[in-house]
Image: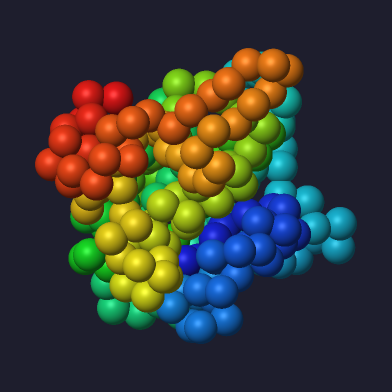
């Protein structure tokens, strides 16, 4: 799976993509990540890409043209079928089911990260895209949501997880998990692993997980 990220701050992704499962997935060529900085598509020697909003208001708005050129560069590299995701607090709620659907149908995903007061809305009229939100809150930019989407979608790619059954949607999962030691003492208080998990009774254990 190939992720094409439109962002003013590609270095923001370095630490997250350079660790653990995603790092290994990139090294094993299970996923690829490419960056397209709108600043690279302007002729202004200052590489300026933002201007004040029409009708006034706080902050600055990212201009349409450099973003359109960055997206176009990504679509040329992607070729064939691709999905474009425009990150927005007012978009459709991102979910595992959406990630699985996109990962199954598309090998190339283009993610547009906003900044400042947003991106000129005409970009959404030029390209067909899904407007997606990762939650009911507003962040400084789209880089964190893009990392979340990469992480969730990458998990859908066979081989990224050591065991494909690690996908929570493929098994009965609970937020409560336990490991050794069986008895843990802290400040004089004893904490034990639930007896059901030590029973070896798979059906009862699965039922316990469902009810957590």
Farthest residue, direction right: 46
Residue 133 place in picture, x, y as percent: 42, 34
Quadrant (top left, top right, bottom left, bottom right) of the C terminus: top left
Residue at horizontal 60 percent and vertical 31 percent from the top = 184
Task: Establish if 12 lies above or below 199.
Answer: below
Task: Establish if 137 lies above or below 2.
Answer: above
Task: Establish if 81 lies above or below 195.
Answer: below
Task: Establish if 125 lies above or below 204.
Answer: below
The residue lying toward the viewer, choosing from 32 and 140, is 32
Q: What's the image's color scheme?
A: rainbow
Residue 150 in view of the camera: yes
Residue 187 occupies quadrant: top right
Give the left or right position of residue 162, taking residue 59 as reference.
left
Residue at horizontal 24 percent and vertical 46 percent from the top = 200
Residue at horizontal 53 percent and vertical 46 percent from the top = 180
Residue 19 place in picture, x, y as percent: 66, 63
Residue 74 place in picture, x, y as percent: 48, 70
Residue 52 occupies quadrant: top right
Residue at horizontal 80 percent and vertical 58 percent from the top = 47
Quadrant (top left, top right, bottom left, bottom right) of the N terminus: bottom left
The residue lying toward the viewer, choosing from 72 and 12, is 12
Give the left or right position of residue 11, taking residue 95 as reference.
right
Residue 53 in view of the camera: no
Farthest residue, direction left: 203
Give the left or right position of residue 46, taking residue 146 as reference.
right
The residue lying toward the viewer, choosing from 66 and 16, is 16
Residue 39 place in picture, x, y as percent: 72, 59
Question: How many discs appear?
Answer: 0
């Amino acid at each position: 799976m190939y992720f094409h990220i439109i962002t003013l701050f590609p270095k923001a992704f370095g630490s997250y993509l350079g660790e653990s499962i995603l790092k290994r997935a990139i090294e094993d060529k299970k996923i690829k990540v490419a960056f397209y900085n709108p600043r690279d598509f302007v002729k202004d020697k200052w590489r300026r890409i933002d201007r004040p909003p029409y009708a006034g208001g706080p902050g600055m708005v990212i201009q349409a043209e450099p973003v359109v050129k960055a997206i176009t560069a990504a679509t040329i590299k992607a070729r064939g079928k691709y999905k474009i995701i425009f990150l927005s607090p007012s978009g459709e709620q991102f979910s595992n089911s959406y990630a699985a659907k996109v990962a199954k149908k598309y090998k190339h995903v283009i993610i547009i990260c906003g900044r400042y007061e947003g991106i000129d809305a005409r970009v959404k009229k030029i390209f067909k895209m899904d407007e997606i939100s990762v939650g009911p809150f507003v962040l400084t930019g789209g880089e964190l949501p893009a990392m979340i989407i990469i992480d969730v979608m990458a998990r859908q790619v066979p081989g990224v997880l050591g065991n494909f059954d690690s996908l929570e949607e493929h098994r009965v999962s609970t937020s409560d998990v336990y490991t050794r030691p069986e008895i843990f003492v802290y400040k004089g208080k004893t904490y034990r692993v639930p007896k059901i998990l030590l029973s070896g009774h798979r059906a009862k254990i699965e039922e316990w997980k469902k009810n957590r």
